[in-house]
Image: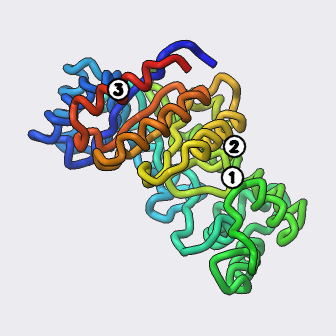
Amino acid sequence: MSGSPIGLAIELADEERSGAARTRALAAAKALGAGGVAFAAGDDDATRATIDAAKGAGLAVTLQVAGGALAGKCPNDPDARTAAAARAGDAATKHAPAAIELVGFGFPESRAALDGALRFLDALCGCAGCARRGAARKLDVAKLAAKGRKLVEAAGGASATKGAPPLERPEEIGPWLVRQLGAGEAAVLLSVRRESLVAQVQDVRRRLPPGVALRSVAHPSPFVGGRALGGGLVALADLLDGFTLDGPADLATADAKSLAAAVKSARTAAQPSSAFTLRLALPGPEGRDATKSLLRAAIGEGLAAVRFAGTSRWSDTDLAELRAVAAAKR
């Protein structure tokens, strides 16, 4: 483990990009000892003013760009892929941030109340773009997607395994998927999806001006979509300067050991040199102790940085205590 302190950053909600809310958020960054700030890119005056204010405060700016997956678009849809890459390139060229962060540049994710295995099948895409990629590997993706939907219907509930715990971890989902789809089909399907992610990120990388870093929200499991690039972290590491991991939705009730294991799993699934930032949405002040415990557990797994959303909810004293936790040797 490294003996250096971990990097800290803040994330701004849309309402924190102007007026008194922005002033408070940047003051919170100072109390935290943050070196960077991330927020959604936009064409409005608030984006430009926030960039100027952040740079004036000595913060490195990361602009977050939304991909097609957030709108249910597949990365193999040529129009959606081109539009997403263009948004990232335009934001980088117009605003010259330190970094662009991709959010939702993978595959769409099912919002149904299903376990991880069934969510993957429920969102399996059989569009023309996916069909073309699959055909190049002699895989009928549309047929496989239809089979996936039938399996979801046949499950008749939220879990892929009736009467058993839901399948959520990739080491559980993978073997089950092989049994349902066949070993060869499952392997080629995941390979095609990985190639699709790499192609999408390559499109973005080509549009970025020199000096602008590129990172993405990511997840080690190839069965995850939505905000994250799911799986393929080894291949993506050659195109990205870092990965961002979404932390638990509710820090007040999250388990420190589970969070540490999730960070370790992501780092194991990538190249040893890959830099990971953990994103944590701060709970109310009543969650201070739980948040500190989570932070201690996570930084022990070799994170490069932690980014906090919702810092304006905490006092400067509380943020300074978080800073002290992060300053401890890993």
Mark 1–mark 2 distance (CA, rounded to whole Å) = 7 Å
Rendered position, 282 above or below 142: above
Furthest residue toward left: 20
* Residue that carries the numbered disc 3 in the rendered image: 36
User: Image quadrant of residue 76?
Assistant: bottom right
In primary-sequence order, the first of circles 3 and 2 is: 3
Identify which amino acid the numbered label 2 is placed on.
Answer: Gly
What number is the disc on residue 93? Answer: none
Identify which amino acid the numbered label 1 is placed on.
Answer: Pro
* Residue that carries the numbered disc 1 in the rendered image: 222
| Tag 3 secondary structure | strand
Classed neighbour count for the residue bearing mark 2: other residues with Cα under 10 Å, few (<14), some (14–19), many (≥20): many
Image mark count: 3
Residue sitting at x 49%, y 39%? 294
Rendered position, 78 above or below 65: below
Q: Is residue 55 left or right of residue 307?
A: left
Q: Quadrant of the N terminus?
A: top right
Q: Nearer the viewer, residue 250 or 271?
A: 250
| Tag 1 secondary structure | loop
Instruction: Tell me residue 199's x, y (percent).
Output: 63, 44
In primary-sequence order, the first of circles 1 and 2 is: 1
Residue sitting at x 84%, y 61%? 175
Rendered position, 113 above or below 323: below
* Residue that carries the numbered disc 2 in the rendered image: 232
Classed neighbour count for the residue bearing mark 1: other residues with Cα under 10 Å, few (<14), some (14–19), many (≥20): many
Identify which amino acid the numbered label 3 is placed on.
Answer: Gly
Classed neighbour count for the residue bearing mark 3: other residues with Cα under 10 Å, few (<14), some (14–19), many (≥20): many
Residue contact at pointers 1 and 2, CB within 8 angstroms? yes
